[in-house]
Image: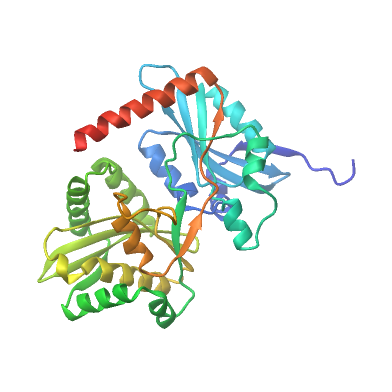
Amino acid sequence: MVGWVLMIVREITESEKAAYNQSVTHIIQSWEWGEFRKKAQVDLMRLGHFEGKTLTCAYQLTFHTVPFLKKTIGYFPKGPMPNEKMIETLKEVGEQKNAAFIKIEPNVLSDKQQTTLRQSSGQASDKLKQLGLVPSKKSLFTKYNFLIDLTKSEEELLALMHPKTRYNIGIAQRKNVQVYESTKSADFETYLKLYFATTKRQKYFGHTQAYHQLLWETLMPVNMARLLIAKYDQKPVVAWMLFNFGQTLYYPYGGSSVEHKDIMASNLVAWEAIRLGKKMGFKIFDMWGALPPDVKENHPWYGFHRFKAGYGPIHIEYIGTYDLILKPQLYNLLNVADKLRWIYLKTLRR
């Protein structure tokens, strides 16, 4: 047939790294993030869809062994919108890996968000259900996020902020809080100390020190990770780790001291992160998650949500989390077991 091109799906090779990174849209899907996961002994597959020699779609996913069972669970975060060929491939790969199911969290806006932005090309949620995916009982990435448009001027960005946020930035500046960028080992140790002090104080489950260490050692040397440290009277009080990929600067992790809360150092760090993103030429500042728009003030993370909202970001809703079920009976059992596990872990945090 004239003009017919064979579509093949295969694993991406090292020589195709640049083309791979140009195809994906989130740092979690970046080649470098995949290398971090592989260094952590996580089973990772990096796949590409090709028409002839042209890469048309690329993504990576991981498989995690279920304790006491010879089964795995697949995790596919922040990838493209699934299509029939992708689902066919995931089923094949899932069978090879003896997976009970694959959790899929596309980097795709919700139907409502697409309609608001006039980007809708049909009901994405309906397409996912037609492909045999079911809404997941548990999400890993948040369904909502805050994004800041870094193409705006500093004056425009300040004008979009809540007055209280601008006021708090001014307090930190008048108190002579010093914020600096760093990739030094000593400052990374400071970051770890403040991060884990914060997780303990706020009683939430963060990643392990080994996770942070390996992530830093993988992304920092290739200029994809850096720190922002705030000092007051020569003492570190706030530390953030920032990532970058493509046209986006990400704020995923941070920590703060219980001391000197009145100097509003975190507000200044956030503002300096925005300014740094502009200086480095990025177009978006991704704040790595938000709560729903109708969240109640008694929600345990409302304070953090409100802090981010103070910077006048766009509130984004993604399509959410879906599961590709490969072993139905085991799928239900594993979801019940996971729910009981988290109930137990949360009792330990009280």
Percent coordinates x, y for residue 302 in the rendering: 32, 55
Q: Is residue 45 left or right of residue 269?
A: right
* Residue 278 in view here: yes
**165 above or below 53?**
below
Percent coordinates x, y for residue 274 in the rendering: 37, 70
The residue that appears at 57% across and 57% down in the rendered structure is 113
Percent coordinates x, y for residue 323 in the rendering: 53, 33
290 or 48: nearer the eye? 290
Q: Please, which residue is most extreme toward the bottom here?
A: 155
**133 above or below 67?**
below
Q: Is residue 244 left or right of residue 52?
A: left
The residue that appears at 64% across and 47% down in the rendered structure is 124
Percent coordinates x, y for residue 74 in the rendering: 48, 31
213 or 104: nearer the eye? 104
Q: Quadrant of residue 65?
A: top left
The residue that appears at 31% across and 63% down in the rendered structure is 307
Q: Please, which residue is most extreme toward the right here?
A: 1
186 or 161: nearer the eye? 161
Quadrant of the rendering where the C terminus is positioned: top left
Q: Is residue 233 left or right of residue 19?
A: left
Q: Is residue 13 left or right of residue 276?
A: right
